[in-house]
């Protein structure tokens, strides 16, 4: 393969180890720009350890870009131990909300969904066992950016994609809510501004604005107790 792609020397090294303990194969702290995984984490008996290790080895601004199987609920213990369901990547599926909670606790403050698709079950025995639950294949972006907040805050910032990423001259998809058209400024929350301005994408974006003036919660992000034109009874404060 090295010769096929015209490299003079190999640019890949292979290490055999456990994803729950990357230090055992010498992977250093704050070293990698990106970690990629495809349907592996759900097979781990200690998913929290996997996330902690990935966070440890990523540089500031680094990204965990990975696809895996998720469920719409917490599965019973017997399903998690069923060898057939485990082999089908169903028994080990994370309840998506628990996954996002765990990711945030570890430091991946604002998990972003890049893609999601429903997994249809066709085998009659599998449906009999676990047809009560819905499963999805979800690709997440998790960024190691300590400055991220637990909600999308509005500082009047914009981000403009320059069209300079190879094979993406017309648009760039950060996640399923943020698709940047080349040359068109997009209003973004401070978290999104950091994701495109403080990561490997920075050279491909122009981010305007700073944190000198806050405009509140970014429109459409989260809930607020501030109800417009509220006619209910007044609160007891002042």
Image (cartoon, rainbow, N blue to C red):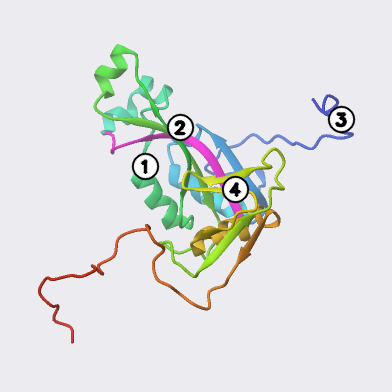
Q: CA distance from mark 2 to mark 3?
A: 36 Å
Residue 117 drawn above or below residue 161: above
Q: Secondary structure at mark 1?
A: helix
Q: Secondary structure at mark 2?
A: helix
Residue 39 drawn above or below residue 141: above
Q: What residue does disc 1 label?
A: 96
Of the two numbered discs 2 and 1 on the same chain, state the one appearing first in sequence: 2
Q: Does the magenta segment cover residue 74?
A: yes
Q: What residue does disc 3 label?
A: 6
**203 sits to left or right of 231:** right
Of the two numbered discs 4 and 1 on the same chain, state the one appearing first in sequence: 1
Specify few, some or many for label 4: CA neighbours under 10 Å numbering under 14, 14-19, or 20 or more. some
Q: Single out the mark in the foreground, 2 or 1.
A: 1
**46 sits to left or right of 183:** left
What residue is rendered at 47% in x and 48% in y?
Answer: 112
Q: CA distance from mark 4 to mark 1?
A: 29 Å
Percent from the top left, x then y, of residue 105?
A: 42, 57
Specify few, some or many for label 3: CA neighbours under 10 Å numbering under 14, 14-19, or 20 or more. few
Of the two numbered discs 4 and 3 on the same chain, state the one appearing first in sequence: 3
Mark number, residue 181: 4
Identify the magenta region.
61-75
Of the two numbered discs 4 and 2 on the same chain, state the one appearing first in sequence: 2
Q: Secondary structure at mark 3?
A: loop
Q: What residue does disc 2 label?
A: 43
Q: Single out the mark in the foreground, 4 or 3.
A: 4
In terms of secondary structure, what is the magenta stretch mainly?
strand
Q: Single out the mark in the foreground, 4 or 1.
A: 4
């Amino acid at each position: 393969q090295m010769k096929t792609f015209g490299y003079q020397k190999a640019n890949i090294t292979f290490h055999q180890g456990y994803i729950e303990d990357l230090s055992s194969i010498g992977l250093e702290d704050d070293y990698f720009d990106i970690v990629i995984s495809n349907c592996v984490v759900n097979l781990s008996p200690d998913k929290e350890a996997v996330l902690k290790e990935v966070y440890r080895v990523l540089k500031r601004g680094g990204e965990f870009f990975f696809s895996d199987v998720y469920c719409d609920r917490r599965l019973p213990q017997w399903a998690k131990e069923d060898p057939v369901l485990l082999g089908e990547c169903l028994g080990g599926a994370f309840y998506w909300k628990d996954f996002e909670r765990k990711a945030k606790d570890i430091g991946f403050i604002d998990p972003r969904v890049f893609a999601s698709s429903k997994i249809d079950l066709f085998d009659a025995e599998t449906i009999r066992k676990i047809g009560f639950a819905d499963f999805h294949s979800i690709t997440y972006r998790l960024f190691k950016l300590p400055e991220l907040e637990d909600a999308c805050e509005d500082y009047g910032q914009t981000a403009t994609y320059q069209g300079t990423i190879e094979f993406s001259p017309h648009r760039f998809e950060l996640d399923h809510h943020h698709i940047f058209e080349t040359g068109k400024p997009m209003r973004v929350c401070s978290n999104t501004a950091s994701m495109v301005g403080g990561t490997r994408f920075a050279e491909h974006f122009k981010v305007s604005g700073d944190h000198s003036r806050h405009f509140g919660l970014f429109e459409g992000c989260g809930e607020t107790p501030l109800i417009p034109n509220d006619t209910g009874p007044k609160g007891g404060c002042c």
